[in-house]
Amino acid sequence: MIVHRAVLAALTIVAAVSGACGRRDPVAPPAFAPPRLIVLITIDTLRADRLGAYGSRAGLTPNLDRFAETAVRFTSAVTQVPLTLPAHATILTGLYPQHHGIRTNDGFTLASVPTLAEALHAHGYATGGFVGGFPLRASSGLSRGFDRYDDDFLKRSTAVERRADDVVAAAAGWIGDHASQPVFAWLHLFDPHSPYTPPEPFATTYAKAPYDGEVAYTDAAIGRLFDRLSGAGLASAAAVFIVADHGESLGEHGERTHGTFLYDATVHVPMLVRVPSVPARVVDAPVEAADLAPTIAELAGTTLRSVDGHSLLPLVAHGGGDPDRPAYAESYYQNVLLGWSPLRAVRTRTWKFIEAPRPELYDLQNDPAERTNRVNDRGTLAAGLQRALPPMDDGRPATTAPAGGDAAERLRGLGYVGGATTPTARSRAVDPKDRVEVWAALEDGIDRIERDPAAARSFFARALELDPSNGLAMKYLGDISFRAGQLDRARDEYRRALAAGFTHPDVFVNLASIAERQGRSGEARDALSQVVKAAPGDADAWNRLGLLEARHNQVEAARAAFTRAIAAAPDRAEPYYNLAIIERRSGNETAAAGHLRQAIERNPSYPEAHYELATGYLAAGDPERALTDYRAALAARPAYAEALFGAARAELDLHRTADARRDYEAFVRIAPPEYARQAAAAREMIKRLQNR
């Protein structure tokens, strides 16, 4: 009896997903000795087609290609989300986003679910995570279970990423320090992510293709990691897993980078696995990023409960697999941000179905670029694939308030837009592919908002012409007006955004600033209170509320707000500093000094904290310690007039007259007009020192 292949595939797929985690291979799981070193390398934004092992002839990845020759290469691996944070949450838990709780890079934290690091730590492994980009900051929740979670570079207030070589150096050193025990090390290499700014010589070599330059540089850094492991005698016995968290569209399907669509440019990822004593092979069966956590756990001799993925060890050992396994992918980026329809997809080795207001079906063998939608002429297959999708959440995914202030600026520097729009039946009917021109106008405006606000305004206006209810565009128009000092106009634009259902902490924060500048402190307090009520974990909003209360001499209210900011973000230095100033104002000098030291522990180059600590020491009659902190403040900010004046006073007390004269003279040269009285005193002191 002949059965039409499409119908057979549809029936197979429906059967394959009858369980929560998909069909498992019938092959008995192999027995592996737990490796003493397990290394997981996640490469951000790496397209599979840039690797020679996946067909590229550009020569960008010689180290990864050599590694692939000795590894199991999965040709049909799928990430569950084409966004950094939710993709990594899936990699490190084995769960789909609806179960681990993270849908986008902004406004979500990891739910109380078991993590791979926790399982390995409990099983005796030292666990280290070394991240390269801001989206994976420890406060996301991914740090749970890691003995060492290295995102220290983010203590610099403007930092958003670090080079792959810095990640490699930190991880390799930590691995070496823990070689006496089993080790799990995760390295996150962020470099291929936009903006594309490879270091030399890659910047010159790939001047016309900077994304490729980032890929080539990242490969070179991985080569240096392999060299260090080999030099330490660790490479041959290590299990190494390499995967991209997602790819990059580079303009395909009208998408500049990633996050919105579920085409293969962003969801088909390279995945390479090398386990000691296992021969190299190629596995064409679909697999998921969610499979990595249970695979690594089983290899280490432990388990993860309640996962959506399943162990790849049978495929690693024996190959094979189910070519019709429906690998899942989703994007809720525009659903959360703009209220538009979410996109969900399943991908077999040969077909992909995308659930959307206008659904899509692609024959990946004959149409790998996904240009011809076959949903109308292959309806039975499309229906079967749609039934293979996991159950959809009821309503909108739960979210915390989007990041505001510093965090929002850092995410925007990486091309990520924050905020949330309350969806309506009308907005959920919007297919993101029908709003490509709207999103392009928004991205063009965001790109120009700093360097050319007038041009940015025109792009946001264009977005509103195409989509009159777009609250995000209204918010950015408000930002431009606010920065230009057009406060009434900004207030009106922010209120329009809120009326359109769009929310973002910065909207309320800026409305509060406008109200305070215009003498309406009660209105300002109400606006900030709305933020902290909606998002009790928003440290920036609590800190700003504290500053507002401090400016109005509401000491207890300011103290309470700064304390909440510290509880929300214990690693952030600024709330400790602000709380110190409040304690000093209240006469609690011991408490003030303690909080200043806490601020400096979190940001050793915090000039104001060093200055205030030094001033306290000087007032307490300890000029030696005062001078040490004045010098630290000046090291961080050489033209810090107040610190120069204070250092000179401390040096006088220490009878270092030449140093005091030098610093008084430097102070006089740079003192701003409001320090005229201090400048006059400094000149008088210089005269006295000259006459000694």
Image: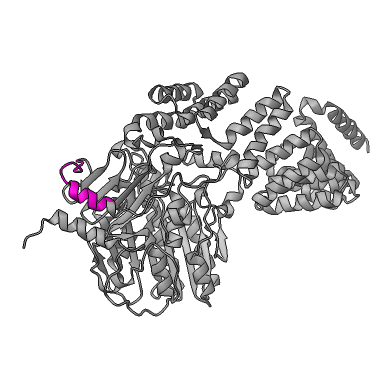
Q: Would residue 364 be seen by someone viewing this image from the given angle?
A: no
Residue at image point 88% right, 51% down: 622
* Between 126 and 558, the one nearer to me in the picture: 558
Whole-percent x and y of residue 475? Answer: 52, 29
Q: Which residues are magenta?
A: 372-386
What's the coloring here? one colour
Q: Check the image and report above or below for 305 versus 248.
A: below
Q: Check the image and report above or below for 433 versus 25.
A: above
The quarter of the picture where the N terminus appears is: bottom left
Q: Horizontal placement of 274 versus 419: left or right?
A: left
Q: Would residue 500 be seen by someone viewing this image from the given angle?
A: yes
Residue at image point 67% right, 37% down: 529
Residue at image point 78% right, 25% down: 673
Whole-percent x and y of residue 294? Answer: 40, 67
Q: Check the image and report above or below for 658 versus 101.
A: above
Q: Quadrant of residue 16?
A: bottom left
Q: Horizontal placement of 180 versus 255: left or right?
A: right
Whole-percent x and y of residue 301? Answer: 43, 77
